[in-house]
Image (cartoon, grey):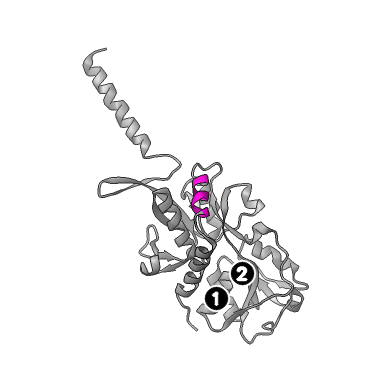
């Protein structure tokens, strides 16, 4: 083989090797000042305060939403930033409707779901999860002064028009309310808040942080402190990061999550609740 041919072969192999470095399960790469850095694409609704929401600037550590002039803020965003920093990757937030999150993960549109998602057994059939990064419980959000404001047990909601988000455990547990008027599931929490305020429904099932957030954002809202609450499995009220099956960064993500103390997690949630965009009262 001639020296010229050997040289050409060497150049070709080097080019292929460099191209391979920019691909793989760890996400795409971006160029910042000429330095290539892997990108962690994280999917979320950006509409589930205090876990995640949409705002118009980068205040309070919000992150630009890919392909839009808007920014994502909230508890999930702060967790996503810690994960990306720990991995040495650049964070990219991708705004996706709730029902589209798992398909987007499976197809590689995003590398992780950090969106207040519970690691239920049903979801584990199609994707994997990290260790939990938050745990809560279910309550019912309603309007102040309404018929069910003083309800203390599930039985007190007899005849109430209750709903929750589509394809969530929140919606499934409504069946535990005796003689409830279960309404059609809704796509997102902003729609449910409007439905409560306008009297279309009596209330909706939410995780406690969302309920606190709703009451903080709108003085017309309150939520129940149930003495005899919903019966749930631990994974129903836990929150974890969704990843593809056998994702190579899952163990590293778990290490990063373990480094975040419970005090830090509670502070992040408290900050998120106080920083959420206020709604019209």
Which mark, residue 214? 1
Which mark, residue 169? none
> Where 38 sits versus 212, above or below?
above
Cβ atoms under marks 2 and 1 closer than 8 Å: yes
Image location of residue 71, percent across then percent down: 39, 65
Residue 200 appears anywhere in the view: no
Image location of residue 228, percent across then percent down: 74, 72
Specify the segment rendered in magenta: 251-258
Main SS class of the magenta portion in the image:
helix
Q: Quadrant of the N terminus?
A: top left
Is residue 11 rendered to the left or right of residue 168?
left
- Of labels 2 and 1, earlier in sequence is 2
Residue 180 appears anywhere in the view: yes
Name the residue that disc number 2 marks: 206
Secondary structure of residue under mark 1: helix
17 or 97: which is nearer to us?
17
> Where 141 sits versus 23, above or below?
below
Mark 1 nearby-residue class (10 Å; few <14, some 14–19, many ≥20):
many
Estimate the spatial distance between the alpha carbons at disc 2 and disc 1, rounded to whole Å: 10 Å
Image location of residue 40, percent across then percent down: 42, 50
Secondary structure of residue under mark 2: strand
- Residue under the image location 62 percent in, 52 percent down: 123
- Residue under the image location 48 percent in, 66 percent down: 268
181 or 71: which is nearer to us?
71
Is residue 236 rendered to the left or right of residue 91?
right
Occupied quadrant, residue 203 = bottom right
> Where 224 sits versus 103, above or below?
below
- Residue under the image location 58 percent in, 73 percent down: 211
């Amino acid at each position: 083989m001639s020296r010229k041919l050997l040289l050409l072969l060497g150049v070709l192999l080097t080019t292929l090797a460099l191209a391979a470095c920019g691909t793989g399960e760890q996400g795409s790469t971006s160029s910042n000042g000429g330095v290539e850095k892997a990108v962690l694409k994280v999917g979320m609704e950006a509409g589930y305060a205090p876990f995640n929401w949409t705002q118009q600037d980068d205040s309070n550590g919000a992150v630009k939403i890919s392909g839009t002039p808007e920014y994502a803020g909230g508890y999930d965003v702060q967790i996503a930033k810690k994960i990306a920093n720990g991995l040495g990757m650049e964070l990219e937030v991708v705004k996706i409707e709730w029902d589209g999150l798992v398909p987007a993960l499976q197809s590689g549109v995003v590398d992780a779901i950090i969106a207040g998602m519970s690691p239920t057994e049903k979801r584990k059939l199609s994707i994997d999860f990290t260790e939990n990064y938050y745990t809560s419980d279910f309550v019912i959000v309603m309007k102040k002064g309404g018929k069910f404001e003083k309800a203390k047990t599930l039985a007190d909601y007899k005849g109430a028009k209750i709903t929750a988000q589509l394809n969530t455990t929140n919606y499934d547990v409504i069946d535990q309310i005796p003689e409830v008027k279960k309404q059609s599931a809704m796509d997102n929490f902003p729609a449910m808040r409007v439905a409560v305020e306008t009297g279309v429904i009596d209330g909706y099932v939410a995780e406690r942080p969302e309920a606190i957030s709703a009451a903080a954002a709108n003085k017309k809202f309150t939520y129940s402190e149930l003495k005899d609450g919903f019966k749930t499995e631990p994974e129903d009220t836990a929150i974890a990061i969704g990843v593809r099956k056998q994702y190579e960064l899952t163990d590293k993500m778990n290490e990063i999550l373990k480094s975040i103390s419970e005090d830090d997690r509670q502070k992040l949630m408290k900050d998120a609740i106080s920083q959420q965009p206020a709604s019209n009262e």
